[in-house]
């Protein structure tokens, strides 16, 4: 781990981390633009970097992207990212009550504390979890991928069936190309361009960046002026450690553990933490009126969830959200397979991710603390210019992968597909993660069946695989169980 | 558009996708060297897509039927109530993007002027078509295109 920190403190790596975090904060602060979009757009630029530098840049963007959302959430009541929705509940009223500096200071401090505590879990748990995951064979991996997909599809907001449909569609789009097991062409329908399948990057940029820009294009453009930040110094006091310390620790733990579970995400982590803090508070009626613990709970948990989500990513190669799916793509592009072997094959990358996460949080603190006033001004840039610039970047980014316009057309096609799916309220998260995980699931299932001579019953002798599949089934059945329980409770309470 | 109608269209599109998967699977040889074979994943996913399309489409049809049954004289709502802004701008941006990529790929026009024109058209669509705005976007577009061209061709060896 110390070696990773030493590697990170080299000038070029540190500058990239600084750049990534700064970019992330700016993009996170602009409503409509997200960390996943920024990471997808930056991915092509990392081809020419070494793997540690590439991952460092992207981790900086991730941390900055989630943290930056608090600025507009507090100043404009427009969450820069979905993770900051909860911050608007108390952050905005606090700013409107004449205390924007205090709201920002608490939000920034809470974000850093959440990040640092979840880093403790990430650094402490990851190597041990990776050693444990080395016992997994193809059956366990197949079951784990299925569990992650089902949980992700089920827990995404909206209809369960549409979540599962999205994951299945994403998996289907990963099928065209040469079947790696036997070298057979499949679903290419005679098009040579499909021989290598749909590239991950054009699909990601299309589904997220293009579809989002097309949606943003239709949205009315409002110009809202944020409240002025009068004081140059953000006010925090030592007494805040006593006042908000327990809340920060509790919210960090909630955020980390929710981050660990695939598909739940930073916004739900913030909401659960906010609700818990409110329930435990002696003054619950003050929440929503500019109450400081509300800002602290949401911002601590959303940042802590990043550390939690990175644990299954680097130990088992399982993405908890779209952003992690893109990070998996980044590792794959650099010929690295995320999972337990990452600690053996490329320890500098595995430990580099862990170290970069901590340093990015500290850089985020310095940047946001010193430049929050200027970042708030950036959010007033005309959105039309921003969207035009991003579209040009999308085209060049997709083209740069193979110096080929086929990838650009694929990107546009997936942008249109993403837009249609969103119109039909089909969530894009499971779609993209299905696309990323489909080849892994198929490969592991085929390897399992080959080892078992085609005997599916072999899985019954694999306890971990059975636990994963049971959890997946439980997740699927949970809505029915929950509704029956609610009906029974209702019947009992309404009985004379 | 009515939400039920959107869901029916979604179910139809998913069924087309499932049909494509089954058609593709039919052209593949049976498993030879391993138990599962190349076509299995397509058949499994195709089957799942049909099931999900059936549920989504069935629910939508049921909702349509119930809405007609309960309100026979009133026309079905044409929107789901959400604020869609100006969808025409989405179409214009998509059309401009297709033209831009077509100009670069099919017509092989040079990157800098085409990108400048692309930024100007987007500026006119998303901001305002006033001459002053267009001039600002033209200057910005030219600067952006030139900077990107220089960085990508000279430093990253990407042939724009």
Image (cartoon, rainbow, N blue to C red):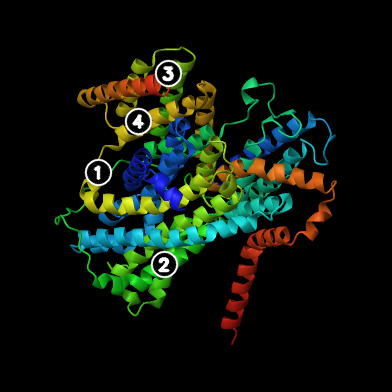
Q: Are labels 4 and 2 assigned to the same chain?
A: yes
Mark identifier at residue A251:
2
Mark identifier at residue B160:
3
**Which of marks 1 and 4 precedes in the sequence?**
1
- Residue at mark 2 to residue at mark 3: CA–CA distance: 48 Å
Q: Residues within 10 Å of mark 3 (few under 14, many from 20)?
A: some
- Residue at mark 4 to residue at mark 1: CA–CA distance: 18 Å
Q: Secondary structure at mark 2?
A: helix
Q: Residue at x 41, y 12 (%)?
A: B109
Q: Secondary structure at mark 4?
A: helix
Q: Which residue is mark 1?
A: A223
Taking A412 as reference, is A490 above or below it?
below
Marks 4,1: beta carbons within 8 A: no
Q: Nearer the viewer, residue A388 or A444?
A: A444
- Residue at mark 3 to residue at mark 1: CA–CA distance: 36 Å
Q: Residues within 10 Å of mark 1 (few under 14, many from 20)?
A: few
Q: Is residue B74 left or right of residue A220?
A: right
Q: Secondary structure at mark 1?
A: loop
Mark 3 belongs to which subunit? B
Residue A246 lies, in percent from the top left, at 37, 73
Residue A334 lies, in percent from the top left, at 53, 36
Q: Which residue is mark 4?
A: A388
Marks 2,3: beta carbons within 8 A: no
């Amino acid at each position: 781990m110390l070696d990773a920190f030493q590697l990170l403190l080299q000038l070029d790596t540190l500058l990239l981390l600084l750049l990534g975090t700064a970019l992330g904060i700016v993009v996170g602060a602009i409503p409509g633009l997200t960390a996943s979009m920024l990471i997808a757009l930056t991915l092509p630029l990392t081809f020419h970097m070494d793997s540690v530098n590439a991952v460092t840049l992207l981790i900086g963007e991730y941390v900055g992207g989630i943290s930056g959302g608090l600025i507009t959430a507090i100043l404009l009541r427009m969450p820069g990212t979905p993770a900051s929705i909860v911050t608007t509940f108390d952050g905005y009223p606090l700013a409107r009550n004449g205390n924007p500096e205090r709201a920002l200071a608490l939000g920034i401090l809470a974000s850093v504390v959440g990040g640092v505590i979840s880093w403790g879990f990430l650094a402490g748990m990851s190597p041990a979890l990776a050693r444990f995951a080395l016992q997994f064979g193809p059956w366990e991996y197949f079951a784990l991928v299925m569990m992650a997909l089902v949980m992700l599809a089920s827990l995404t907001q909206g209809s369960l069936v549409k979540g599962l449909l999205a994951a299945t569609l994403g998996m289907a789009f990963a099928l065209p190309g040469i079947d790696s097991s036997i070298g057979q062409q499949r679903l290419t329908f005679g098009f040579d361009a499909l021989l290598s399948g749909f590239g991950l990057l054009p699909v990601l940029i299309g589904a997220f960046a293009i579809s989002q820009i097309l949606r943003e294009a239709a949205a009315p453009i409002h110009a809202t002026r944020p409240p002025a930040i009068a004081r140059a110094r953000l006010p925090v006091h030592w007494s805040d450690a006593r006042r908000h310390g327990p809340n920060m620790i509790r919210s960090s733990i909630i955020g980390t553990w929710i981050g660990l579970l695939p598909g739940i995400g930073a916004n739900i982590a913030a909401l659960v933490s906010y609700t818990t803090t409110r329930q435990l508070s002696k003054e619950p009626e003050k929440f929503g009126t500019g109450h400081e613990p509300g800002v602290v709970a949401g911002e601590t948990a959303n940042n802590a969830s990043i550390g939690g989500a990175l644990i299954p990513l680097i130990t088992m190669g399982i993405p908890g959200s779209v952003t992690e799916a893109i990070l998996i793509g980044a590792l794959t592009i650099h010929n690295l397979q995320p999972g337990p072997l990452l600690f053996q094959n490329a320890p500098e990358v595995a430990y580099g991710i862990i170290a970069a996460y901590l340093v990015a949080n500290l850089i985020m603190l310095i940047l946001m603390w010193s430049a929050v006033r200027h970042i708030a001004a950036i959010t007033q840039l005309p959105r039309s210019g921003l969207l035009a610039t991003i579209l040009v970047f999308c085209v060049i980014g997709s083209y740069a992968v193979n110096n080929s316009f086929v990838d650009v057309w694929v990107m546009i096609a997936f942008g249109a597909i993403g837009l249609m799916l969103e119109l039909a309220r089909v969530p894009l998260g499971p779609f993209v993660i299905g696309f990323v995980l489909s080849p892994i699931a198929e490969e592991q299932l085929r390897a399992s069946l080959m080892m078992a001579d085609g005997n599916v019953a072999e899985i019954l002798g694999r306890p971990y695989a059975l636990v994963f599949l049971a959890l997946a089934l439980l997740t699927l059945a949970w809505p029915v169980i929950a509704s029956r329980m609610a009906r029974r409770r209702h019947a009992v309470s309404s009985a004379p | 558009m009515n939400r039920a109608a959107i869901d029916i269209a979604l179910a139809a599109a998913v069924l087309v996708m499932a049909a494509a998967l089954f058609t593709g699977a039919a052209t593949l040889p049976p498993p030879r060297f391993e138990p599962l074979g190349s076509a299995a994943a397509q058949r499994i996913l195709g089957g799942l897509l049909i099931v999900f399309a059936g549920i989504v489409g069935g629910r939508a049809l049921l909702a349509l039927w119930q809405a007609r049954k309960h309100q026979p004289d009133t026309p079905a709502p044409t929107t789901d109530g959400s604020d869609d802004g100006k969808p025409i701008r989405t179409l214009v941006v998509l059309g401009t993007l297709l033209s831009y990529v077509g100009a670069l790929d099919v017509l092989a026009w040079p990157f800098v002027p085409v990108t400048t024109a692309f930024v100007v058209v987007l500026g006119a669509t998303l901001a305002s078509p006033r001459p002053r705005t267009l001039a600002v976007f033209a200057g910005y577009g030219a600067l952006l295109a030139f900077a990107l061209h220089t960085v990508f061709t000279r430093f990253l060896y990407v042939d724009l």
